[in-house]
Amino acid sequence: MSGVDRALRGAILAAAGNAAVRTLVGRYGMQLGARRFVAGEIAADFLHAARGANERGFAVAVGILGEGVRDREEAIAAAAEYRSLLHEFTEQNLDANVAFKLTHVGLNVDPSLAFDNAARIAETAHVNGNTMRLDMEESPYVDATLEIYRRLRERFDCIGFVLQSYLFRSLGDLEAVLPLRPNVRLVKGAYLEPSTIAYERKRDVDENYLRLADLALSSDGYTAIATHDPNIVEQILQFAAAKNLPKRGRFEFQMLYGIGTPLAEKLLRRGYRVRLAIPFGTNWFPYLMRRLAERPANLAFFLKGAFSRG
Ligand SMILES: Cc1cc2nc3c(=O)[nH]c(=O)nc-3n(C[C@H](O)[C@H](O)[C@H](O)COP(=O)(O)OP(=O)(O)OC[C@H]3O[C@@H](n4cnc5c(N)ncnc54)[C@H](O)[C@@H]3O)c2cc1C
């Protein structure tokens, strides 16, 4: 990442915490361009997008937009919504699973509430023959997330988690969980982290991604390669070929709704399993800001929408 990009990324993520920006973007953002990244505000919008994605050959992961919840009832309601979606996937025969943030289901209220809610979602996924994944949030949540993952993993096979290649610690975290035959999604990382704990240069983040992927693909678990980076995808295809991995069953590719679609379609055509992460919900503001921060050019696209509407 160039210095300018990094500064812009920092500015966008800092603006995400500003109440006035939140109000303004919250009021007009969906019409201006948030729909590029978000299926809509209600479950029906998501189900429509998920059916379309399945028809094109993609698996789907739903994310209900919400994080940093401070209210117990809200956290319980979020978990209930995930469970009801898992039932819906079975009833509608959708190839879809769930991925959620622990702060959405109560980590900031009480870690035991987050654990109980995550365990209920895991139980529902298990009963439905499906899977669920804990997203990874900012670095202060990493220890608690890994702890909850480990405790859930003792009881359930159907759960996965995420590691971020920008964090120095992730390689050690992966080595530590390998005996659990983990289902791990590898990402570069979407938050602004201090240089004392995270790589800053794109080259270092990418190199660490490949180290993590090499180790994960050499182990007994299942690996979700979640990136839109064509260079990384190409390297993964080479690793997989060198390790004689079948095209499906040991790993999959994952991309975000509205990003990297031509690459995702190319992988599908070549016979790989590709999952689209499709979010929906009214609380889309922080998610949109992370997508804008990842690629500041998106900001121009977003602002163009604002000005062309006067
Ligand atoms: C399925 C999935 C789940 C994720 N879950 C998490 C998570 O739990 N925790 C977490 O911290 N992060 C998560 N992320 C986000 C991730 O950390 C990165 O921020 C994001 O994927 C961008 O990095 P990249 O790997 O695509 O590589 P980059 O090097 O950032 O981008 C490579 C190329 O992809 C395209 N691209 C990337 N981002 C965008 C964008 N926003 N808009 C348009 N084009 C873009 C561009 O062409 C760019 O050149 C997830 C990403 C995916 C795909």
Image (cartoon, rainbow, N blue to C red):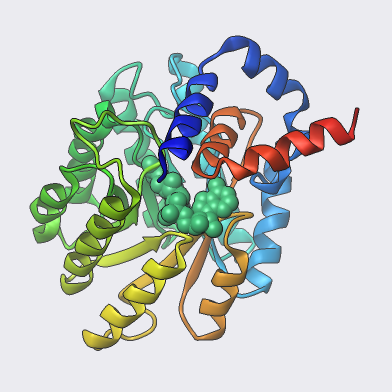
Q: Is residue 280 visible?
A: yes
Query: Does 167 sit above or below residue 20?
Result: below
Find residue 308 and report its image quarter.
top right
Q: Position of residue 304 (x, y in %)?
A: 78, 38
Q: Is residue 34 visible?
A: no
Query: In front: 92, or 104?
Result: 104
Left or right of 130? Residue 283 is right
Which quarter of the image is occupied by the C terminus? Answer: top right
Q: Position of residue 90 (x, y in %)?
A: 56, 60
Q: Residue at x 39, y 34 (%)?
A: 191
Query: Does 287 sit above or below residue 237?
Result: above
Find residue 269 and report its image quarter.
bottom right
Find residue 21 and report its image quarter.
top right
Q: Position of residue 72 (x, y in %)?
A: 43, 16
Q: Residue furthest front?
A: 3
Left or right of 131? Residue 285 is right
Q: Residue at x 28, y 45 (%)?
A: 166
Query: Does 151 sit above or below residue 15?
Result: below
